[in-house]
Image (cartoon, rainbow, N blue to C red):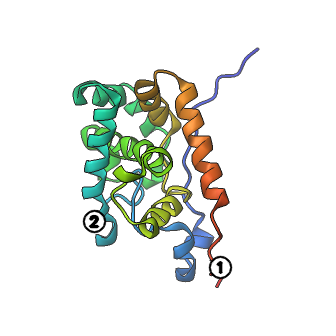
Amino acid sequence: MSQQQGPRIIPRVPQIFSGIDSNKKCYEPMVVSIGPYYHGKHDGLKEMEKSKQSMVRGFVQQSGKHVEEVYKTVVDVAEEARRCYVEDALSVILNDMTKFTKMMFLDGCFVIQFMHCLLRDHQNLKMSSHFAALVARDMFLLENQLPFVVLRSLMKLRFGSDEGGIKLIKDFIKHIRAMPRQRESCRK
């Protein structure tokens, strides 16, 4: 008998850790907000929203599809994606499906296009290597994640199958793991 699982939940940092101010640099994004938990939280994250727009245009252009078709791909999985976030963290963005879907579209296209440009199309990255390293750091934070269903739907549209997108993610992880670690510890 197979047991059907519900959606995977993107958790919050446990209160015991998030209540300590010195821990914030270990889980709060520095330059880019991905998903609803830090969406619009401070000015440093709002600046990156402009760069996201440029990356989305690049994603749509390279997909060979119309923006409406790309957006519809996200609309089709938005409700499932919304269920992946912790209910007690509901914000205006989670309660408004139109805003939530637009955020998933923007962030999903950005994540895939950022990985693509960092690895395969560096001239279209349009940010310094230092800034790109900060973006990559933020993409690995616990509370700064997108549901895989959003990424998978966009990767299928962009690459025609799962294989191209999965390879991109694996290559991105290998690239990040090969980078030198930060000298400063989060425990400090």
Instruction: Report helix, strand or loop for mark 2.
Output: loop
| Residue occupied by mark 2 | 47
Name, please, the residue furthest toward the bottom: 188
- Image quarter in which the N terminus is found: top right
Disc 1 crowd rating (10 Å Cα; few below 14, some 14-19, many 20+) is few
Query: What amino acid is found at the position of numbered circle 2 in the picture?
Result: Glu
Across and down, in percent, residue 80 comes to: 45, 31
- Residue at image position (52%, 75%) is 24
Above or below — where is 34 with respect to 161? below
Q: Is residue 160 left or right of residue 126?
A: right
Disc 2 crowd rating (10 Å Cα; few below 14, some 14-19, many 20+) is few
Marks 1 and 2 close (CB-CB < 8 Å):
no
Query: What amino acid is found at the position of numbered circle 1 in the picture?
Result: Ser
Is residue 156 or residue 62 the one in the foreground?
Answer: 62
| Residue occupied by mark 1 | 185
Above or below — where is 65 with respect to 167? above
- Residue at image position (56%, 82%) is 22
> N-terminal of the two: label 1 or label 2?
2
Above or below — where is 138 with respect to 117? below
Is residue 66 or residue 24 the one in the foreground?
Answer: 66
- Residue at image position (42%, 46%) is 121
Q: Is residue 106 left or right of residue 154?
A: left
Instruction: Report helix, strand or loop for mark 1.
Output: loop
